[in-house]
Image (cartoon, rainbow, N blue to C red):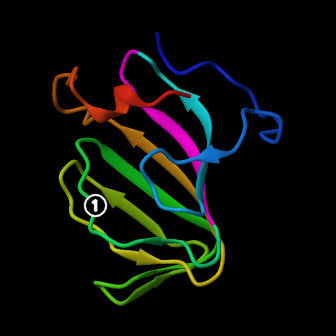
Amino acid sequence: MAKPEMEFCDSLPMGQWRKVEGAGEGISEKILSWDPDTGNLTRLVKFSAGASVPNTQVHDFCEEVFVLEGYMLDTAKKITAAPGYYACRPEGMVHGPYEVPVSCLCYEVRYQDPAKPLNPDCSLYRMKP
């Protein structure tokens, strides 16, 4: 199976916003597409004003993030990620922590490294869209 074939459509009725499992208060997601065979997914992530990711993050998958609205502060690197900012994080890249003084909306793609064999233990498989 692969991600579903989908033409341009209104994403508002697609799924519901839900709290991101394991994240702090004020961080929610809307899954746009998900491949159960790889765990690869595309989602929107919404951070409420005052939300934070207080610790550094390291994933066992690749992650690409594009800021659509608002901004977040990378407190370690002293970077303000505003609309139009983009990050590409290979598996194992350390990033964060973050503070969100005003709300922030991000478009995010998560996927297993295509240069490596599929990892059946990858945390992406634990997502439940």
In the rendered image, the vertical position of residue 99 relative to residue 33, given as above or below: below
Query: The magenta stretch spans which residues?
Result: 37-47
Q: Is residue 71 magenta?
A: no
Measuring 42% from the left and 49% from the top, which residue is drawn there? 22
Q: To which quarter of the image does residue 116 belong?
A: top left
Q: Give the residue at x 36% y 25%.
A: 125
Categorize mark 1 by other alpha carbons within 10 Å: few (<14), some (14-19), many (20+).
few
On screen, residue 119 above or below 68: above
Q: Position of residue 14 (x, y in %)?
A: 75, 33
Residue 43 located within the stretch drawn in magenta:
yes
Asked whether 10 or 75 is in front, the reply is 75
Picture coordinates of residue 35 (x, y %)? 47, 22
**Residue sticking out furthest to the bottom:** 78
Looking at the rendered structure, the secondary structure element under dot 1 is loop
Nearer to us in this view, 83 or 7: 83
List the residue tagged with mark 1: 57
**Viewer-closest of 57 and 25:** 25
The x and y percentages for residue 120 are: 22, 20
In the rendered image, the residue lying farthest to the top is 1
Quarter of the rendering containing residue 47: bottom right
- Per the picture, the main secondary structure of the magenta-coloured stretch is strand
Point 51% across, 72% down: residue: 85
Q: In the figure, residue 31 lies in which quadrant?
A: top right
User: Is 3 in front, or is 77?
Assistant: 77
Residue 46 as seen in the image, left or right of residue 89: right
Residue shown at 58% from the left, 72% from the top:
84
Q: Is residue 12 left or right of residue 75?
A: right
Query: What's the residue type where badge 1 is placed?
Result: Gln
